[in-house]
Amino acid sequence: MRSRYKSAIWKFIQKHEFWVLMAIWVGFLIIYEITEDALLAGVMGLISIVAITRLAMHPMWKKGEQAEEE
């Protein structure tokens, strides 16, 4: 039963990957505002780059390319 929930959570994360990364980024932003730790700003930048890259690689952007190939 436990693996079923784990699988459902993992599928949700994969489906909504960009928004999950943005939620993590907002969490880091809140922590950064409280602590003003310089390391968190670098981590937030890295998360932003990963989120934008993953969004750019999303299949929805490739619909036009697939139509041209066919």
Image: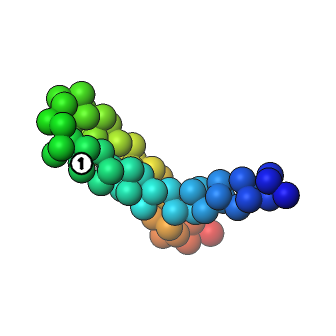
Whether residue 2 sits left or right of residue 66 in the image: it is right
What quarter of the picture does the C terminus occupy? bottom right
Q: What is the residue that sits farthest to the right in this orientation?
A: 1
Nearer the observer, 46 or 54: 46
Q: Is residue 68 visible?
A: no
Q: What is the residue that sits farthest to the front in this orientation?
A: 34
Above/below status of 11 relative to 24: below
What quarter of the picture does the N terminus occupy? bottom right
x%, y% of residue 33?
16, 45
Give the number of marks: 1
Nearer the observer, 51 or 11: 11
Q: Is residue 32 visible?
A: yes
Q: Residues within 10 Å of mark 1 (few under 14, many from 20)?
A: some
Above/below status of 38 relative to 3: above
Q: Residue at x 32, y 51 (%)?
A: 27
Please, what is the three-letter code of the amino acid marked with disc 1? Answer: Leu
Q: Residue at x 45, y 64 (%)?
A: 61
Whether residue 31 sits left or right of residue 52 in the image: it is left
Whether residue 51 sits left or right of residue 57 in the image: it is left
What residue is pinned by disc 1? 29
Tell me the element at label 1: helix
Q: Residue at x 24, y 48 (%)?
A: 29
x%, y% of residue 14?
59, 56
Q: How is the image coloured?
A: rainbow
Q: What is the residue that sits farthest to the top in this orientation?
A: 39
x%, y% of residue 46?
32, 37
Q: Residue at x 18, y 37 (%)?
A: 35
